[in-house]
């Protein structure tokens, strides 16, 4: 079983094309916070200075891409110290309606910064160790892309589709960007110890096998002993190895994942609460409701009703 695919599918991961820019210097914008989303900015021409509330900053050159995984606010500008009004203010000022190119300023076209910007969204309340491990930002330079032919080809194709503006281009970019996100995670493994550890868990012979079992049958009455036996490890060694790599114990991981599956089933809207409880491994709707409310602060019924409004 492809565990990563199951995770992204359950968390309702999807790409969404945002805009492309033509910013003539001097320029600067503040991109607002957007929960449960990951943004990216790919520089096609010119340079872009990116800074974060933490004080970290970086400058992107043509071919460079920054992924901002946790929806954090950030500042884009041609140089540090520029006035940086909110992105919405800039869009309103130039009359941008979300279609075509966001043009700011009317300077030399050859000096303008052109970017492809977009975001990836996750369902509200989506949670998983891989999301928790994502850093403030992941930078993929043009030179790094050159060492990753598959990612480089995807980014070139995204850029071509965006700039042609042909029928179907936006849909193509949306689908391609989902592949790009996965490739960026793979390429960025070395950027942060937490992310590297979580992705190492998928490849670990024993822990990876345990994850496959959990994701294949989340409703099964798994115990630490049973999982350890299935992967050929002692109970203590398995629990320790699992916790080191994923930052959570096997039973806590299972409990959280069952509730993530429940969110996906509730969003689907077709199954009853009683049926969902059984599908995700709870012996009764009452036990499921207690666990759900303890995690999300509302009952499954209330959650479903709120989604409908």
Image (cartoon, rainbow, N blue to C red):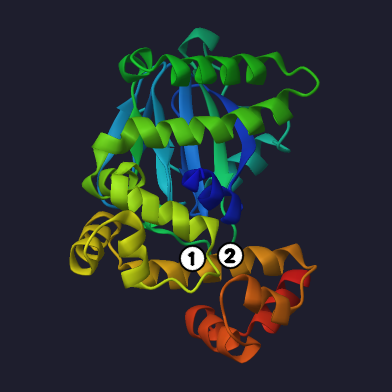
Residue under label 1, please give it.
257
Q: Is residue 303 left or right of residue 113?
A: right
Measured in 3D between alpha carbons, the distance from the residue under mark 1 to the one under mark 2, in whole angstroms, is: 6 Å
Residue under label 2, please give it.
261
Whether pointer 1 and pointer 2 mark residues with C-beta atoms closer than 8 Å, the reply is yes
* Extreme-top residue of the structure: 110
Residue 254 in percent (x, y) is at 44, 68
Residue 118 in percent (x, y) is at 56, 36
Q: Quick one: label 2, few (<14), some, or many (20+) residues within 10 Å?
A: many
The C terminus lies in which quarter of the figure?
A: bottom right
Q: In the depicted view, which residue is nearer to us: 57 or 269?
A: 269
Residue 166 in percent (x, y) is at 77, 17
Q: Quick one: label 1, few (<14), some, or many (20+) residues within 10 Å?
A: many
Q: Is residue 182 above or below residue 115?
A: below
**Element type at mark 1:** helix
Q: Is residue 158 left or right of residue 62?
A: right
Residue 94 in percent (x, y) is at 66, 34
Which quadrant of the view contains residue 56? top left
**Residue at point 40% right, 37% down?**
185
């Amino acid at each position: 079983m492809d565990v990563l695919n199951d995770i992204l599918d359950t968390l309702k991961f999807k790409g969404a094309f945002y805009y492309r820019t033509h910013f003539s210097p001097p320029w600067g914008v503040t991109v607002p916070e957007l929960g449960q989303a990951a943004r990216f900015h790919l520089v096609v021409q010119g340079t872009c200075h990116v800074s974060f509330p933490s004080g970290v900053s970086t400058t992107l050159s043509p071919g460079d891409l920054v992924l901002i995984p946790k929806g954090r606010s950030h500042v884009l500008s041609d140089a540090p110290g520029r006035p940086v009004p909110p992105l919405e203010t800039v869009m309103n000022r130039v009359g941008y309606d979300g279609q075509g190119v966001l043009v700011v300023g009317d300077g030399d076209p050859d000096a303008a910064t052109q970017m492809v910007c977009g975001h990836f969204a996750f369902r509200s309340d989506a949670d998983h160790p891989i999301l928790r491990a994502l850093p403030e930002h992941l930078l993929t330079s043009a030179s790094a892309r050159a060492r990753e032919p598959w990612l480089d080809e995807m980014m070139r194709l995204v850029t071509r589709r965006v700039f042609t503006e042909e029928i179907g281009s936006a849909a193509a970019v949306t689908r391609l960007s989902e592949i790009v996100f996965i490739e960026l995670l793979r390429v960025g493994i070395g950027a942060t110890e937490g992310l590297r550890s979580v992705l190492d868990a998928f490849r670990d012979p024993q822990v990876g096998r345990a994850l496959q079992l959990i994701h294949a049958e989340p409703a099964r009455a798994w115990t630490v002993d049973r999982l350890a036996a299935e992967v050929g490890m002692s109970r203590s060694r398995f629990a320790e190895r699992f916790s080191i790599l994923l930052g959570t114990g096997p039973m806590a991981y299972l409990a959280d994942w069952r509730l993530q599956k429940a969110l996906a089933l509730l969003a689907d809207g077709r199954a009853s609460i009683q049926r969902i409880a059984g599908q995700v491994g709870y012996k009764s709707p009452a036990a499921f409701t207690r666990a759900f409310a303890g995690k999300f602060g509302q009952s499954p019924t209330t959650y479903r009703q709120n989604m409908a409004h």
